[in-house]
């Protein structure tokens, strides 16, 4: 059975996982401050890690991603979900410290967008999915954003303030 860590699990901890959260009123198995490292687990202790609507709350995204890299075994998966920076929910929560795009994690990629000096950890991007509001989904924009890389770049640069993003879904494999 795979070992799963649910970071910032809140009250909806993923079934079968070990949940960590800073709030004792949650379903967490381990209470810890997600901005203090290392988390209380051994290196490569998990097969999968979920951080659903958490990464936008941490103080240091780079250090948090390095910690995720430490915790997940090679060949394992890291699942991250966060609001797109053009979605209302990105700014209406006063605890959000970061507002992200579908390109926000490229520093950790194999070619690291020319910014490899920020961190030595690397991830293989297994999935980047952008969810749009239903109207834009029905009109086919979500399909284009997710299946035509040049269109996603064009959308992020020019269209996302009109055809706003809702949620970003990432899946990474530690290298």
Image: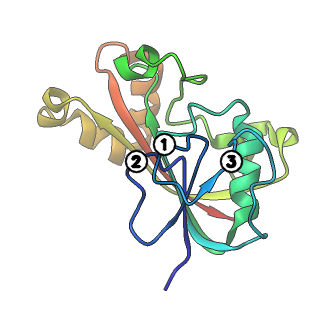
Residue that appears at 75% across and 55% down: 39
Neighbour tally class for label 3: few under 14, some 14-19, many 20 plus, Cα within 10 Å: some
Earlier sequence position, callout 2 versus callout 1: 2
Give coordinates of residue 28: x percent, y percent: 52, 54
Q: Secondary structure at mark 2?
A: loop
Up/down of 63 relative to 124, above or below: above
Up/down of 88 relative to 142, above or below: above
Q: Which residue is mark 2?
A: 11
Give coordinates of residue 66: x percent, y percent: 76, 51
Viewer-nearest residue: 126 or 148: 126
**Image side of residue 20 versus residue 89, left or right:** right
Q: Residue furthest right?
A: 117
Q: Which residue is mark 1?
A: 25
Neighbour tally class for label 1: few under 14, some 14-19, many 20 plus, Cα within 10 Å: few
Give coordinates of residue 41: x percent, y percent: 74, 65
Residue that appears at 45% across and 19% down: 93
Residue that appears at 71% across and 64% down: 71
Q: Secondary structure at mark 3?
A: loop
Cα separation, mark 1 vs mark 3, equals 12 Å
Q: Which residue is mark 3?
A: 32
Q: Quadrant of the C terminus?
A: bottom right
């Amino acid at each position: 059975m795979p070992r799963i860590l649910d970071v910032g699990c809140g009250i909806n901890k993923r079934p079968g996982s070990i949940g960590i959260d800073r709030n004792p009123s949650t379903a967490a198995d381990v209470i810890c401050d997600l901005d203090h490292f290392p988390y209380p687990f051994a290196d490569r202790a998990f097969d999968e890690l979920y951080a659903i609507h958490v990464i936008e709350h941490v103080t240091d995204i780079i250090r948090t991603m390095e910690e995720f890299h430490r915790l997940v075994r090679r060949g394992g998966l890291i699942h991250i979900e966060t609001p797109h920076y053009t979605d209302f929910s990105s700014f209406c929560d006063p605890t959000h410290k970061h507002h992200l795009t579908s390109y926000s994690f490229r520093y950790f990629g194999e070619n690291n967008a020319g910014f490899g000096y920020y961190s030595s950890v690397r991830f293989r991007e297994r999935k980047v999915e952008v969810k749009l509001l239903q109207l834009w989904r029905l009109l086919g924009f979500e399909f284009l954003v997710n299946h035509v890389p040049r269109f996603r770049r064009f959308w992020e640069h020019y269209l996302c303030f009109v055809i706003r993003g809702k949620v970003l879904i990432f899946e990474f494999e530690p290298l």
